[in-house]
């Protein structure tokens, strides 16, 4: 039952996601969560290493988009900077917003990864939509109050199981 909350890959940072791995898995697209995945929630600028990764993925021909529960203004501004289509006020974990992103990107669920920092919105929703899910450790900084007070505490229970599950690929852990 808990497996619906498990990612296919778990990495300590978004920059651990290499284009070669995605291509080897037959993936052609990547849907990113926004806050604390590709940009800190308390920032409007992506870190240089994240922008490098985006350019590297684009250079390998991967299509990308953003699905976020945040506002049109915030998501739209960052998506424009990164030159990606986006779905705002997504109401994750419902699969509809992910399907809309797939349409915008022109990819199918079987050939698309979802990268996010939250188990109960990003990973659960991505799994419901049939995507290859990648969980990243959240970036440092401010979090939405509901995430901080509720979700992160519940996630610890699932994370302990994910870290021990041989069916989940794991990135480097120092």
Image (spheres, grey):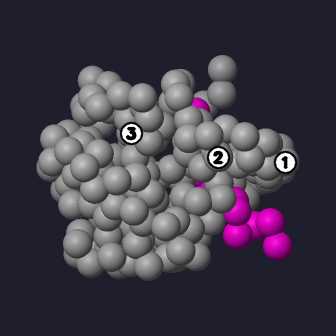
The disc, 3 or 1, on the residue closer to the chain's N-terminal end is 3
Q: Quadrant of the C terminus?
A: top right
Determine which of the numbered discs, if any, sits on residue 38 in the image. Answer: 3
Under circle 1, the secondary element is: helix
Q: Residue at x 32, y 70 (%)?
A: 101
Disc 3 to disc 1, C-alpha distance? 24 Å
Residue 25 x, y percent position in the rendering: 44, 61
Query: In the image, is residue 10 part of the stretch drawn in magenta?
Result: yes
Residue 144 visible to the viewer: yes
The disc, 2 or 1, on the residue closer to the chain's N-terminal end is 2
Determine which of the numbered discs, if any, sits on residue 157 in the image. Answer: 1
Determine which of the numbered discs, if any, sits on residue 146 in the image. Answer: 2
Q: Quadrant of the N terminus?
A: bottom right
Question: Is 9 situated above or below 87?
Answer: above
Determine whether label 3 and label 1 are within 8 Å by CB. Answer: no
Disc 2 to disc 1, C-alpha distance? 17 Å
- Range shown magenta: 1-14
Q: Nearer the viewer, mark 2 or mark 3?
A: 2
Under circle 2, the secondary element is: helix
Q: Residues within 10 Å of mark 2 (few under 14, many from 20)?
A: few
Determine whether label 2 and label 1 are within 8 Å by CB. Answer: no
Left or right: where 21 falls relative to 61? right
Left or right: where 88 falls relative to 90? left
Q: Residue at x 74, y 47 (%)?
A: 150
Under circle 3, the secondary element is: loop
Determine which of the numbered discs, if any, sits on residue 102 in the image. Answer: none
Q: Residue furthest top?
A: 174
């Amino acid at each position: 039952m808990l497996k619906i909350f498990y990612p296919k890959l778990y990495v300590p940072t978004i920059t651990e996601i290499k284009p070669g791995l995605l291509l080897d898995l037959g993936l052609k697209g990547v849907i990113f969560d926004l806050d604390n995945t590709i940009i800190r929630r308390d920032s409007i600028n992506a870190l240089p290493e994240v922008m490098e990764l985006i350019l590297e993925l684009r250079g390998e021909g991967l299509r990308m988009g953003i699905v976020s529960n945040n506002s049109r203004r915030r998501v739209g501004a960052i998506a424009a900077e990164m030159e990606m289509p986006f779905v705002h006020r997504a109401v994750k974990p419902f699969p509809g917003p992910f399907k809309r992103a797939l349409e915008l990107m022109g990819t199918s669920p079987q050939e698309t990864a979802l990268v996010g920092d939250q188990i109960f919105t990003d990973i659960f929703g991505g799994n419901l939509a049939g995507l290859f899910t990648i969980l990243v450790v959240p970036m440092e900084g401010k979090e939405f109050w509901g995430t901080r007070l509720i979700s992160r505490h519940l996630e610890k229970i699932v994370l302990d199981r994910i870290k021990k599950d041989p069916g989940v690929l794991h990135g480097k852990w120092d």
